[in-house]
Image (cartoon, helix red, strand yellow):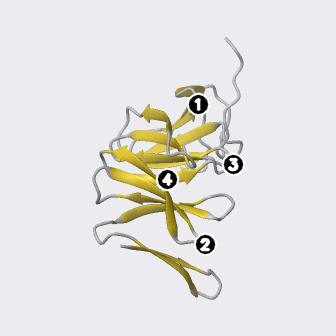
Amino acid sequence: GMVRMWEFRSGKELKTINESAAAVRLRVAFSPDGERLATASSAEAPRPVRVWQIAAEKEICRFPGHRESIISVAFSPDGRDVASADLGSRIRVWNSKTAEEVQALKVNDSSIFAVTFSPDGRSLASASADGPVHVWDWTTGHGRRGCRLSTPSAPGCPARCGHGAACSRFRPCVTSAG
């Protein structure tokens, strides 16, 4: 398989990263500095996430370990960590420089369809096919209190956190102690 990158406005192909013929990439994510690219595999076993140095068109890191197809990848805002989520409802967070797994989370809902870091990098959100959005303190592996977002009750209403604060866009919920 191949990963191709284009210049958006002109449509000119800029880079092509060649991989093994068996590799099928479902998801890709740019690092915040735009110098690296994470790719997620669905065909290889174990299904790895790879990090590529774009300019050199070279694989610089590989994270093994997912048993199910990887459906989402995301870089942390500082580019240090990469989160990956699979159809088996598992989320893994890896150090993008050392390939060390720094966290593993299991969601008890259906398959995860998306994972993303908060702008400050302290929280991780996961969205499931037929379940709620979970917001995690990914460094501890604990869900943030009151932050299991569910579907709005009426069209046009924002989603609400469990503690009642409107969450019209993703942000970590602020809760008081106790």
Is residue 152 in view?
no
For the residue marked with disc 3, what is the amino acid? Answer: Asp
Residue 13 picture location, percent across and down: 55, 85
Labelled pair 4, 1 in contact (Cβ < 8 Å): no
For the residue marked with disc 4, what is the amino acid? Answer: Val
Number of residues whose C-alpha sits closer than 10 Å to that of mark 3, classed few (under 14), some (14–19) or many (20 or more): few
Q: Is residue 89 left or right of residue 14?
A: left
Is residue 127 in view?
yes
For the residue marked with disc 2, what is the amino acid? Answer: Ala
Q: State the mark number for residue 139.
A: 1
CA separation in Å, label 1 and label 2: 31 Å
Which residue is label 3 attached to? Answer: 78
* Position above or below: 48 against 161: below
Q: 63 or 108: nearer the eye? A: 63
* Residue mark closest to the camera, 2 vs 3: 2
* Position above or below: 58 against 114: below
Q: 118 or 37: nearer the eye? A: 37
Upstream in sequence: badge 3 or badge 1: 3
Mark 2 lies on a secondary structure that is loop
Labelled pair 1, 2 in contact (Cβ < 8 Å): no
Which residue is label 4 attached to? Answer: 73
CA separation in Å, label 3 and label 1: 15 Å
Q: Residue at x 30, y 45 (%)?
A: 67
Which residue is label 2 attached to? Answer: 55
Quadrant of residue 55 in the image?
bottom right
Residue 165 picture location, percent across and down: 68, 32
* Position above or below: 177 against 124: above
* Residue mark closest to the camera, 1 vs 2: 2
Residue 125 picture location, percent across and down: 55, 41
